[in-house]
Amino acid sequence: MKRSTDRILTTHIGSLPRPARLVELMQARLSGTPFDAKLYAAEVRKAVTDIVKKQAEIGIDIIDDGEQSKTGFVSYVNERLAGFEPMKRPASGSPFAGSREFLAFPEFYNAPANQGAAGSRVSTHWVCTGPVSFKGQQQLKTDLDNLKAAIEGQKIAEVFVPSASPASVEGWQENEFYKSDEEYLHAIADAMHEEYKAIVDAGFIVQIDDPWLVTHYVMQPAHSVADSRKWVMPRVEALNHALRDIPEEKIRHHTCYGINMGPRVHDMEMKDIVDIIVKIRAGAYSFEFGNPRHEHEWRVWEGVKLPAGKSLIPGVISHTTVLVEHPELIAERLARFAKVVGRENVIAGADCGFGTQASATPEIHPTIVWAKLQALVEGAKLATKQLWGRA
């Protein structure tokens, strides 16, 4: 894994805006409407090529395929894991319904203008009804082949591929087959291990998308911080099991609080989870920092011993606001972390993805997403000048 040895490297979290034509085809596919499979595959390949080129042109160092082929950051596993079946249910509203946030601000979240504030409505629910195993070898190979073709000739430092954590899969797909949560979780971990290893074997960094690590607390109003920590520990153990035999320097871990454009006064605080996060087998840790609810948390890392050779990827631009962060502010944010953990251990990142669900209207308009990423690159250059004394 590349580190910021001579300048602050830049990256993001994974999902980027999809072209309108691809979104139309994805939505047709999701709804069961007939679509041209060859055209769909061609549109995905083109989208990956274009998104890789766009990242390289802007100057992002560590890029991915923008998750152009995925219908969602975790829902894509429905096509790659055996043992699950769709269960049609009435639209259930936001997946955050019943959370601490909804209970605290019902007037806000129930207002028509804010119906999309914390995630899209969902109508298809997937349930585990049999043994879980990995069956997505061909889909994964296609994704990796598209990415390999797209990066040829591009000036980039490194490439990562996002993949859902066992806890994310467990959280979105109910268990009606396994006798215990532990048995279910470890079955998922064993299945996802195949995807993680294939990504690394293909020459890429695997990024584990693990929002449930910190969102469990807000989703379970009856749970205390201690209860949530107790819930998290076996999920981290399962993740480490899923990452077995993969070098830590080939893994980066991302956690966040989901797509919640609300007050978010009940987000779990970094101080209550950081000691568990650094136990995850990864060479870099990505987390929210670029929004007002978490920007102060850089000080938490003053009391944490970051293991040697590992990096932090704090979000210095956010998915929670349409405001485009000023490059000087981004540079200041990066400098704070550099002062605490060392400049070589900091990579500029984002709070979350910008196109997590193909079925939902993007929270941030694509033109603003690219403006934010351009500011990220400019801010990293300013931080490099400040920290190394040169551009």
Image (tube, rainbow, N blue to C red):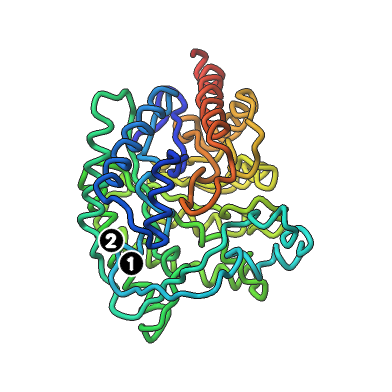
Q: Quadrant of residue 156?
A: top left
Left or right placement of residue 325 versus residue 383 in this view: right
Where, by quadrant of the figure, is residue 323 drawn? top right
Residue 43 x, y percent position in the rendering: 32, 41
Left or right, 255 with reference to 176: right
Question: Residue 59: x percent and y percent?
Answer: 43, 23
Check disc 1: other Cα within 10 Å, few if <14, some if 14-19, many if 20+.
Answer: many
Placement of 336 over or under 227, stated as above or below: above
Q: What's the amino acid at mark 1?
A: Ala
Residue 332: image x %, image y %? 63, 28
Q: Residue at x 58, y 52 (%)?
A: 259
User: Whole-Å distance between the Cαs marked 1 and 2?
Assistant: 6 Å
Q: Quick one: SS at disc 1?
A: helix
Closest to the observer, 36 or 164: 36
Mark 1 — residue? 189
Residue 96 lies, with reference to residue 352, above or below; the image says below
Q: Is residue 185 left or right of residue 295?
A: left
Q: At 47% from the left edge and 27% from the top edge, which residue is drawn? A: 8
Identity, as a three-letter code, of the amino acid under mark 2: His
- Residue located farthest toward the bottom when viewing the structure as drawn: 179
Check disc 2: other Cα within 10 Å, few if <14, some if 14-19, many if 20+.
Answer: many
Please give the label number shown on residue 361: none
- In the rendered view, tell whether residue 60 sits above or below residue 176: above
Q: Position of residue 290 (x, y in %)?
A: 61, 40
Q: Quadrant of residue 382?
A: top right
Mark 2 residue element: helix
Q: Nearer the viewer, residue 353 or 93?
A: 93
**Do callouts 1 and 2 mark residues in contact (Cβ within 8 Å)?**
yes
Quarter of the image with the N terminus is top left
Q: Which residue is mark 2?
A: 193
